[in-house]
Image: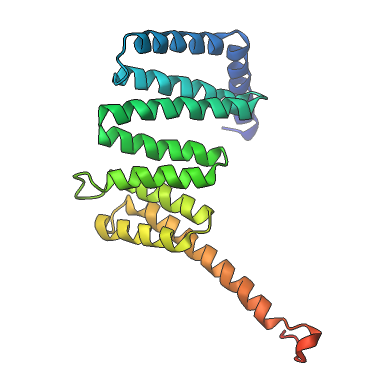
Amino acid sequence: MPQSKKQEINGRSDRRDRSLQDCGYDRQACKTYRQAASALEASGETDNVVLAETYLALMAVHFHRSRHNKDGARNMKKAIAWYDKAIEVYRQRADVRDLSANLTNMSALLFQAGQFDRAVEVAKEGLDIAETLDDPHGHFRLPAWNHYATYCRQVGKLDEAEKTLKRGLNIIGKVHASGFLIETLAGVYEERAQQLRQEASQLMVCDASCGSPKSR
């Protein structure tokens, strides 16, 4: 398909999304989900999985708004707040598999919001839970390893990132899915290499006070 045709189709899609929002479908969805959440809360079923899913739906609405609305920061904050409420339901249910998966997913939302330290904290909790589960091949834990290591790298915790990824690779072995962990590990090594180059440059360049010529 010609590039101009693709751009035309993408443009139509963007306009359609904005039109749907302008027509109020987005607001109506939010209102309906809020009503459903209020009804479930009033019933006292605070550990109902449907309540968690309703909170997640509200999170998704506000996340979508954060990407397509000029008031993105406020909507991202609301998305995180709704995800927090969903997480609390999963805690009450003691469904550790769902709790772990949603903590890992929430860490991605926090990362996109620029809350890097909290993303690390939430991803670590998700990983700690995942590592208690019966998962002999490591497939369930793979996203948890990858997310946690990625955020550790972002905040400069390269040793922790490397240790986590190597632990995952030792468990999962050399399979198709391990490519995600290997790619993230390569990023950690690239970060280390960059730091070493900067250190080398500082050592090789001597100012006039040291009495040695500059290395070339």
Between 192 and 45, which is closer to the camera in this rendering? 45
2 up-or-down from 177: above or below:
above
Mark yes or no: residue 104 visible. Answer: yes
Residue 92 placement, left or right of 17: left
Residue 91 placement, left or right of 75: left
Q: In the rendered image, which quarter contains the C terminus?
A: bottom right
124 up-or-down from 162: above or below:
above
Task: Give percent across and percent down for residue 141.
Answer: 30, 46
Task: Give percent across and percent down for residue 14.
Answer: 61, 23
User: Which residue sits at x=60%, y=73%?
Assistant: 197
Residue 84 placement, left or right of 8: left
Extreme-right residue of the structure: 208
Quadrant position of residue 73? top right
136 up-or-down from 43: above or below:
below
| Picture colour scheme | rainbow
Quadrant position of residue 106? top left
